[in-house]
Amino acid sequence: MLKRLLILLLSACAFARAETFLSMEPLEPLSSIKQRYTAARLTPEPADWLKPNQYFARLTTDEVSGSLLLLFEHDDDARKKKLAELEKAVANLPPNAHARSTRLLIRQQKEHLGKPLDNRLALVLIRWIPEQAVALSELTSRYGKPDEKRAGDGSRGPTFVWSKGVTAHMSDDKKSARMIEYWFTEDDLAVYFLRRNTASR
């Protein structure tokens, strides 16, 4: 029954998924991208805005023109905090079913933290800078009208946002996109976790 419910939810969420780019999955590990394209095609990209838990890389591929940049991040700090909370909680629990499930969660957290860094770094953003700007008409024919339009400022031009997980950084005349970012929506992440849970049953 639960498995059937998960499959129904998965089907429902699939209609709300964001646009994909090169079939990359939300939270896909860096190790998976390296395996698909080879590590030599990924080179670290320096950026002064990067956080300690993030990794920014340039991907060289013949599948698209221009520059393709990928942002990965890990949640080690959050997992370590959760692990400490679980270990504190289980110390005061009697040996019952609740204690066993808590110990299982502890083991899962430790197993994840014990993985190589490339397996812990998960894809959260794809940035594409095409060789030639993409016409707004092409974007609207694919995604519909933008859900949000932001005015430009001194450092960046106008920005159009689609709730499907697409952000286009536009030219000053707003007729073409100079850079497009693909990010993963809450629906994307829901589908990802439902697929993972369904596959593990």
Image (tube, rainbow, N blue to C red):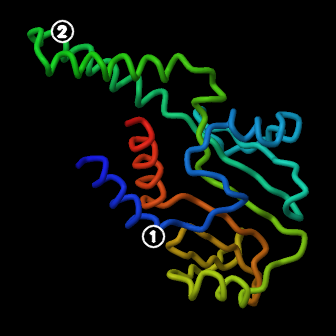
Q: Residues within 10 Å of mark 1 (few under 14, many from 20)?
A: some
Distance in Å between CA atoms under marks 1 and 2: 42 Å
Q: Residue at x 83, y 78 (%)?
A: 133
Mark 1 or mark 2, earlier in chain: 1
Q: Is residue 46 above or below residue 100?
A: below
Q: Nearer the viewer, residue 62 or 59?
A: 62
List x then y, in percent, for residue 148. 51, 80
Give the residue type at disc 1.
Ala
Q: Is residue 38 left or right of residue 116?
A: right
Please tell me whether mark 1 or mark 2 is closer to you in this view: 1
**Callout 1: helix, strand or loop?**
loop
- Residue 139 lies in what quarter of the image? bottom right
The residue carrying mark 1 is 16
Q: Is residue 181 left or right of residue 178?
A: left
Q: Is residue 133 above or below residue 179?
A: below
The number of discs equals 2
**Callout 2: helix, strand or loop?**
helix
The label on residue 91 is 2
Q: Residues within 10 Å of mark 2 (few under 14, many from 20)?
A: few
Give the residue type at disc 2.
Ala
Q: Is residue 146 above or below residue 68?
A: below
